[in-house]
Image (spheres, coloured by chain):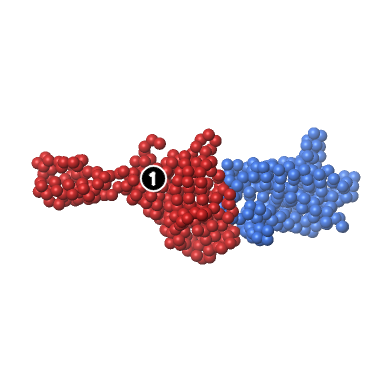
Amino acid sequence: MTRTIRLAARQALLEQRSFWRSAEYALFTFAFPLMILLLIGAANAGSHLAGTDIKRTTVFVPGILAFGVIVAAYVNLGSKVAVLRHDGVLKRIRTTPLPSGAYIGGLLVSTIATVIFITAATGMIGWLAFGAAPRPGELPALAAGLVLGTVCFATLGLAISSVITSAESAGPVAYASFLPIAIISGVFDPTFSGLPDWLSRLVDMFPVKALAEVLQNAYAVRPFPAWDLANLGLWTAAGAVFAVWRFRWHAT
Amino acid sequence: MTGDAAVRVAGLRMSFGATEVLHGIDFDVRYGEVFCLLGPNGAGKTTTLEILEGFRAQTDGHVSVLGMNPAAQPARLRERAGMVLQECGFPRQSRVAELIDLWRSYYPNPRPLGDLLEVVELTEVRNTQVRKLSGGQRRRLDFALALAGDPDLVFLDEPTTGFDPEARRRCWAAIENLRRLGKTVLLTTHYLDEAEQLADRIAILRAGRIELAGTTHEVAARAGLATRISFTTPSALRRGQVPLPDGIDLSVRGPESVCHTGNAAMTLRMLLDWARQHSLGDLAGLAVTAPRLEDTYLQLTRDPA
């Protein structure tokens, strides 16, 4: 067991080193959410949600926190595993005595590290630039939401990796499968509305809005997000079942 | 117990659905030898290797690798057997030494890093990113990773397919280094010269059957191929002033006369007697060529299965 943990830690370290070594990859992962944070945040600064004294940025910043979690856990991990499988790296791992748990564990730990970095960057900028901070005493709730979101979207990332069939399409498929949902979920615009009723109900089914609302609850008083937590739990379970069922060490 | 064989294969059969691709093959690989499974594409070489590596369970028959049943104990086997598969990639951003070092951490008794770099001649590119390596260098990195745990046995699946002559030569040198380290090597190839160059013993696999096995000379001899005897056609023979020798299937092909025989010594004696009788001297340009593996292989693989 300790050997597995040690090996996983070592694997995670190499993954992180590789991640930062690939400048364009790291930059894109970080630049995209942070750019949106600054641009749209600036446009929203100073105004309030209609009929309330809640600043728009107070809801917008945690939305971007959710976005960062999804990019790091779902897009990055999903496309990474798809590429590793396509390149035959997973197959090569199988020729060694490394326990599969240590390998997958290493990938997950590295993903968690990326989530922590991107969350810290988004949170700090949101606080310094727009004065958006979690409600007093809500930091544990925020952390719990981040953990749940990371687990949920990392599971979904592993699941989507089995659907991606080529290294070239890995990034695009991962992005295309959540970006439209993120937009109509109002992650980039807290006042986004005017959707047909059926569409907004459909979007509510996905975990993107759920995670955003859970994190928003730590920033601004909202109804307790019971439904959102259940939603994330269900998606995690479904993602885990699919990921385990379809996981392959070699490209087909 | 397995006795002195590193790999023992007996009556191995493998079917995919209703199609049987291995029809009961037998061979042994001794400790410390380089054994080559030679055969054309689709003969079943990779399938055989995958069974020995524990990636597939056979349909029938017995296999033992380093005394283990590979399908039942894959993790234990992998601590002592290195594997080079066909077309396996590397993590994209990793560097040579860093990757080898990571691989070393997977094993209980790894070989020293510097030693590994030396065996595969990658010391000078140790800090290079893997994606910048040439095809030959990548293959040698494959070897280094397979050797990281200091295995007793190394599987190499078609190690030089698609390489230019220089890359092949360096790859062969690396395999010779494995032999020098006392490793048992089981390699597959469809290149005859590779088998001839590297292998202590070979088995020719064709359409799921072992056609022949043994040292290269044994294989050629067992194929029933004849020794070739040739000499410069004496002018008297060419002009028809001398009768052809009795009991020898000699053909006069212009400047060269050639015969094939299963008993080289006797045929040679008869030829020289005949030459003395007809005052042809010692037969200028006399050459005796033992049957070559190439002839055997070509004959085997050209025949319909």
The residue that disc 1 covers is B212
* Quadrant location of the N terminus of chain A in the rendered image: bottom right
The answer to whether residue B149 shows anywhere in this view is yes
- Give the letter of the blue chain: A
Residue B216: x and y, percent?
36, 50
Residue in view at x 28 percent, y 49 percent: B290
Residue in view at x 58 percent, y 46 percent: A250
Taking depth in this image into account, of A250 and B133 the one nearest to the observer is A250
Instruction: Give the side of residue A196 with respect to residue B230, left or right.
Output: right
Residue in view at x 44 percent, y 55 percent: B30
Taking depth in this image into account, of B102 and A54 the one nearest to the observer is B102
Chain of the residue under label 1: B
* Quadrant location of the C terminus of chain A in the rendered image: top right
Residue A29: x and y, percent?
68, 52
Residue A164: x and y, percent?
63, 42
Q: Quadrant of residue A14?
A: bottom right
- Give the letter of the red chain: B
Q: Residues within 10 Å of mark 1 (few under 14, many from 20)?
A: many
Which element carries disc 1, helix, strand or loop? strand
The answer to whether residue A118 shows anywhere in this view is no
Q: Quadrant of residue A184?
A: top right
